[in-house]
Image (cartoon, rainbow, N blue to C red):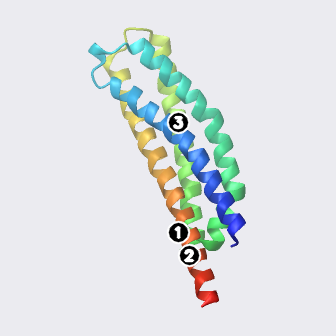
Amino acid sequence: MNAAEIRAALNAVEKDHELALKKVRALKNAVSCLIDPDHADVSAVVEQLRDLNAYFTNEFAAHTAEEETTLFPLLERHAPGGPELVARLRQEHRDICRKREEFANCLGIAVEVGDELPRMVVRDLLADGWLLWEMLDRHAHTETRAVHQCATRSFQGAASAKA
């Protein structure tokens, strides 16, 4: 792996993950408001969750497609346990998409019900939103760590070759 490949992978992952992590934090904050729905503007929270869900529906799909065509082949070849790591990351992409769809379904119910959300709907929004947040956060960190490990291995290999 050459320096240009490493730089491109690092830049792509960090740039995309920086934006995604901002949205993930916003998701966590919005969902956290539902912990005490009696003291939250639930309709405003639901609207914010709908906006975030729209982001994850569109941007995350494009992001995962890009990763699977550009980042994953690099990780497969150069990361420790590359093929297994990439298989796990691909499965995480599918799991995240499935959880986002569940969250979207729950949001759809919340929108239909209106301002007076039953506790069960609030509970489901909280549970699905929190799990989605955890999955996205963990996944982004795993990918970032893998790219950094590739870079480290590449630099160590280059240093050994020069010695």
Q: Foreground mark, 2 or 3?
A: 2
Q: Secondary structure at mark 3?
A: helix
Which residue lies at the image location 61% right of the left edge and 58% below the top edge?
10
In the rendered image, the vertical position of residue 93 relative to residue 70, given as above or below: above
**Which quadrant: the C terminus?**
bottom right
Q: Residue under label 2, please give it.
A: 153
Mark 2 and mark 1 residues within 8 Å of each other at the beta carbon: yes
The percent position of residue 95, horizontal first and vertical second, equals: 52, 47
Task: Give the alpha-carbon distance from disc 1 to disc 3, as whole Å.
Answer: 29 Å
Residue type of the residue flagged with mark 2? Arg
Q: Which mark is first along the chain, 3 or 1? A: 3
Residue type of the residue flagged with mark 3? Arg
Q: Residue under label 1, please give it.
A: 149
Task: Give the alpha-carbon distance from disc 2 to disc 1, as whole Å.
Answer: 6 Å
The percent position of residue 85, horizontal first and vertical second, equals: 54, 65
Q: Residue under label 3, please give it.
A: 100
The percent position of residue 79, horizontal first and vertical second, equals: 57, 71
In the drawing, does residue 31 fall left or right of residue 90? left
